[in-house]
Amino acid sequence: MTIRSMLLACSAAVMLTAGAAGAKTLVYCSEASPEGFDPAPYTAGTTFDASSHPVYDQLVEFKPGTTEIEPGLAEKWDVSADGLTYTFHLRPGVKFHSVDGFTPTRDFNADDVIFSFDRQADPKNAYYQYAPGISYEYYNAMDMPKIVKSVEKVDDLTVKFTLTEPNAPFLADMAMDFASILSKEYADKLASEDRKADINNVPVGTGPFEFVAYQKDAVIRYKANPDYFKGKTPVDDLIFAITPDPAVRMQKLQAGECQIMPYPAPADIAALKADKNLTVEEQPGLNVAYLAYNTKQAPFDNVNVRKALNMAINKQAIIEAVFQGAGQVAKNPIPPTMWSYNKDIKDDAYDPAEAKKMLDAAGVKDLTMNIWAMPVQRPYMPNARRTAELMQSDLAKVGVTANIVSYEWGEYLKKSKDPARDGAVILGWTGDNGDPDNFLGVLLSCAGAESGANRAFWCDKDFENLITKAKQSSDMAERTKLYEQAQVVFKEQAPWDTLAHSTVFMPMSKKVTGYVMSPLGGHDFYGVDIQE
């Protein structure tokens, strides 16, 4: 389907809001549909690309292309000497978007900040669970209910966060997508009209683009926010042309039907680089792909079984066949580009004969298991189905029958965090803030096991003590040592088979200017222009 036919398929509302003649339109061939447009309940980059990045802002943000913190909706902030109080001084005059049925009557203020965090923390808040299945996975996986004692309004333009303990990553955490600031006035209006779920369907933020319309699995349309506090972005309209197949994304890019595409198939990189009309940017990914065992379920509750399965899987073959050189075998749950990476860790050797002996010693015979394979490309995993097929073949050599299962992306994410989930799931992670806690704490903590972000449902006392001490310390050397020790525990206990760290490629038209690749893997189109 071409972008023209998709646009014709959109509702009349979309077409009526099309830009005037001569308006600049940037088309991004995105890889999948978002789960929703409220960033806080989700963890998928696809969802953040469509919600928090264009529509919302946070109190602080990452300087483009870096993990360096700079002012966002807060102009400045103060941190108490004991590290327990963060006082944010808010930017005056920031405007919220208008959408059909809602026009804001006031500027952004402290009430919006209070609401945006209180709804994730307080079960009594009307938006704590405003729709079936809604939960705040990041907030809970990062143990924020325990860490954040209170969020208080000092005055309209000042908000004070009080913590129960020092937390070194806290400021960087406030730049993450779950910390996006929503309009309390809009939320109150929706609640009064019994339409709370629309906060996830028709988003209202302060960001560079205003949401216009969404046709599920086809098109998302945005328009530039003329009142954005940093100034209007150069393009007038932004379109996400949802295109799951990487070959079709490539065709659309080469045909000029979109100007930017993510996650090309590794086999297509050379052809894209050879196209004189395109630029292909690339950088090492701050990411990891993994296979997470359900450690609550026999026989995966046995560390020796997990280690044996790891030894049965040929990860180098996956790198060659799936990543085609655009990645490296992973041995740790954090990438080698991240500080505190433990280079001395020894990976589980590929040794099918030893794996079979270990399974026999554990009394595991004729094991049948499921391997969950993602239906979409991600920066850390170009083809999960092919990866699962290679695993299936490897495991058969040690007497294990692996069945491959998959679901639509949103369902996959939802079902895979159910503790009753069977087998092992292929997933991965791109860092959100440049801190090791964002990997080790979110993905492998006991709080993460409860929230579902920890897909292995693994809760290890020794590991937990190490990462807790690390995030409470402000001493970088001490934190590094603790995280290095935590990686040793992780490797000994093997809740995952760590698969790969990938190189990330971003093909785009040579007409595109101002696009900056993020080390955090997201796609931000503020400041992007098209030169005709």
Image: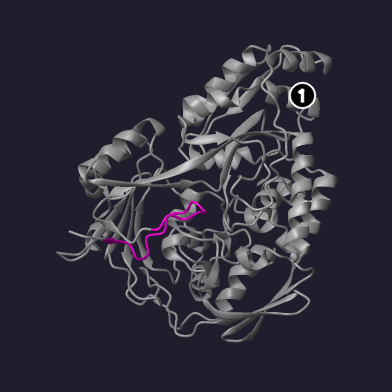
Q: Is residue 185 magenta?
A: no
Query: Circle 1 is placed at which residue position?
Result: 305
Left/right placement of residue 192 relative to residue 353 reads left
Left/right placement of residue 320 relative to residue 456 reads left
- Number of marks in the rendered image: 1
Which image quadrant is residue 266 in? top left
The residue that appears at 51% across and 39% down in the rendered structure is 502
The C terminus: image quadrant: bottom left
The N terminus: image quadrant: top left
State whether residue 125 appears in this view: no
Residue placed most toward the observer, 267 or 128? 267
Residue placed most toward the observer, 344 or 264? 344
The residue that appears at 18% across and 66% down in the rendered structure is 20
Query: Is 115 placed above or below 495 here?
Result: below
Kind of element beneath mark 1: helix
Point out residue 380 in the picture as x, y percentages from the top left corner. Answer: 52, 40
Task: Give the magenta part as a residue range.
Answer: 516-529
Residue placed most toward the observer, 66 or 115? 66
The residue that appears at 61% across and 79% down in the rendered structure is 77
Point out residue 526 in the picture as x, y percentages from the top left corner. Answer: 37, 64
| Amino acid beneath label 1 | Val
Point out residue 395 in the picture as x, y percentages from the top left corner. Answer: 64, 17
Q: Is residue 517 magenta?
A: yes
